[in-house]
Image: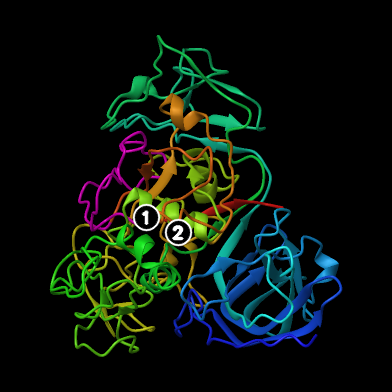
Amino acid sequence: MVRRFAFTLLLAALATPALANNLQISNISLTGQNTTSDFTKVEFDISWEHSWRDNGNWDAVWLFVKWSTDNGYTWQHGTLNATAANHTAPSGSTIVPAADSTGVFIQRATSGSGTVTWTNVQLRWEYGIDGIDDNAVVLVKVFGTEMVYVPTGSFYLGDGTTSMIAGQFEAGNSGDPFLISSENPLTLGGTSVSNLSNHNAQGMQTSDDFFYSTTKSLPGTFPKGYNAFYCMKYEITQEQYRDFLNTLTRIQQTNRVQTDISGTSITNRFVMTNTTTVISRNGLRCDAILSPSDPVTFYCDYDGDGIYDESTDGQNIGMNYIHRNDLLAILDWMALRPMTELEFEKACRGPLPPRVNEWAWGDTTYIASTAVSNAGGPNEVSTTTGANCSFGNNYGVHRAGAFATASSTRRAAGSSYYGIMELSASLGDPVVSVGNSTSRSFQGQHGDGEITSSTGSANTTGWPPELGFRGGTWIHTNSTYPRVSSRTHAAWNSQNGYFNNSGGRGVRTSP
């Protein structure tokens, strides 16, 4: 039987042109339906700028599919084949599927750098496993987010600082950095140099539950950063969060925004800040008149002119005002997972010996941006000479990747060792802490692409109910907070509310 498909236009996670996060996915179609084995190929073109692959690491795009058989009223996560040979990777690329069939990575097959443009990518979608009939009319969306590969290997926790202690990791009570050389269990606290200690939790806003006098165990199943993982290159953007909201039911949506959208009319249309105007650069908005029960359509309107999703509407500005539950929901929906605080330090400094008080780009030199040009646009850049971060309660959160160019150095771009952006300052990076027993039980489970129908919450078993954060934020003026090793807020449940400096990113253990 001939299968009939209807198609939607792509709502890619980072689809608007930008200097450092110009991911484009286009020309989506379905082809090669096999009604015997109940699969078809999802075909599309993909491109993004500032891609690279070298002997150390590379960037990639995590791709996943959403589908609807009720004309877009509800969306489900697509099951993609877990064997690489069953997908079609264009020349110069390679496709690495996830074993749980929730998505794939596409990346360079050989060394190189610059813009990549690949046509006729084909992903094998097992629609029969998803319970879809051969003759169904299906709407399909393809989403992607840029990721960076962090390879397997040893690294250090803590930087050996002797000033302004904020719970930094150390080897016993020596003050020296602690080497992570495996994923084996660890003893937390105590004074032995074989234990991972924390300067007796000195300087932490919320204390760890281990000290020189009290030890705890960190299981081998807790992701320590030794094993390879992929980390989102940028913080979640306002466009990504908009696209997430626009695949949810009305009931799910009501729990993922701050404004009450349960009725048929609203005044505070900027839904993440619950205001009538843009606050702290968050431009997510909806209409004033709503259907009684249909899903709400959300837009980006940073310039506040009522004309939605223009090039000046801030799609690529970092997404702030994310509640902890919002972050866990979107990570589950993307089939990613939260990052641990040990992985955070690995993502920042890589295998290099730590430098005292270093920020994510490997030294203590920073210039905070105080103004931008092309505000809200895909080419938004700082006008502050030499600026490499959003910090000091100056202008606010910037466009993702705003400080990077094709030729910028690590310091100038505000980049980590591996090429991950905005790990110091900008928005706080929520992490799974080692500072309490509940969080230590985390085993690195990935999201399954689905969230609960009743509340729009993450449904992945084993995810911690609390997240701390690392890396400092744009609103901070204390320059100790953005240090790689600073754990001031590592054990604090930092996202139990809507804050103008709370954002997030996800990771995924390497297949």
Which corner quadrant holds the N terminus?
A: bottom right
Q: Where in the figure is residue 86, as x and y percent of width and height?
A: 83, 70
What residue is shown with label 2? 330
Quadrant in the picture for residue 140: bottom right
Q: Residue at x 69, y 88 (%)?
A: 4
262 relative position to 57: left or right: left
Badge 2 marks a residue whose secondary structure is helix
Question: Residue 369 placed where, x, y %?
Answer: 26, 68
Give whichever of 283, 287 is nearer the camera: 287
Q: Secondary structure at mark 1?
A: helix
Type of the residue with mark 1: Asp
The stretch drawn in magenta includes residue 478: yes
| Prevailing secondary structure class for the magenta stretch in the rendered image | loop
Up the image or down, 314 lies above or below 193; here it is: below
Name the kind of residue labelled 2 in the image. Answer: Ile
Q: Name, please, the residue furthest toward the top.
A: 213
Instruction: Let me know if residue 260 appears in the view.
Output: yes
Question: Relative to residue 387, is residue 502 depicted above or below?
Answer: above
Quarter of the view holding residue 379:
bottom left
Q: Which residues are magenta?
A: 474-503
Q: Position of residue 297 (x, y in %)?
A: 34, 78
* Residue 421 falls within the magenta-colored stretch: no
